[in-house]
Image (spheres, rainbow, N blue to C red):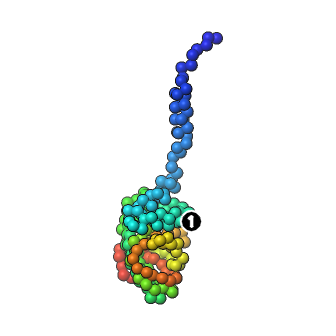
Amino acid sequence: MPNYPSRISGRCLMAAMLAILFLFSSAPLSAAETSTYSQMEIVKSGHKFFGKFSADLASVVEHVFRKKGRPTAYIVGEEGGGAFIAGVRYGEGWLRMKKASQSKIYWQGPSLGLDLGAQGSRIMILVYKLDRSEDMIRNFTGVEGSAYMVGGVGTTFLTNGRITLAVIRTGLGLRLGLNVGYLKFTRKPTWNPF
């Protein structure tokens, strides 16, 4: 048999192997990854929204992601409230989901417990297991005061049984205490916290 010279150079062979390796290693994103937000996306949005508190925000977001994973939605907005044993808070913001347009949302809620003070906050709420924006229009209960704090940024968790909220707050004022309450989300603003 005649001995034919090899027509494939080492460089071409290496390039072909790298291309094949790249194709097999870059698996498509799963449906869960395309409908949820990454930690980097949340931190980037928070940096724009929170401004000077953004360094502390990254630590709080990392803590929330370790506990809960990737959120399916998030809300950015502002809220204010006050308390003397019984308290109240009101807020408004924008609900953002990957596969839906952003929508305006309002919240209000009472609290009862050892609570004193007033505050105005910028707020980011990470939302877990939200399939449709309409599912946010309900009450979410929780215990305030069980917060994870870094610098001027803190978080608490609220739930309605299926959907969980990680409420991240920063702002002016001081509100100290431990209380039980809920947030009621609505499409229109209302002064009635119940």
Amino acid identity at mark 1:
Lys
Residue 188's spot in the image, x, y percent?
A: 35, 74
Which quarter shows the C terminus? bottom left
Q: Nearer the viewer, residue 76 or 9?
A: 9
Which quarter shows the N terminus? top right
Residue corresponding to mark 1: 67
Residue at 40 percent of width and 74 percent of height: 171
Rendered view: 115 above or below 141: below
Residue at 48 percent of width and 85 percent of height: 115
Residue 15's spot in the image, x, y percent?
A: 52, 31
Residue 172's spot in the image, x, y percent?
A: 39, 77
Residue at 38 percent of width and 70 percent of height: 77
Furthest-bottom residue in view?
Answer: 85
Q: Nearer the viewer, residue 10 or 94?
A: 10
Residue at 45 percent of width and 72 percent of height: 152
To which quarter of the image does residue 69 belong?
bottom right
- Which element is circle 1 on? helix
Furthest-top residue in view?
Answer: 2
Residue 110's spot in the image, x, y percent?
A: 45, 82
Furthest-right residue in view?
Answer: 1
Label 1 crowd (10 A; few <14 / some 14-19 / many >=20): few
- Let me know if residue 172 appears in the view: yes
Q: Nearer the viewer, residue 76 or 190?
A: 76
- Left or right relative to 63: residue 191: left
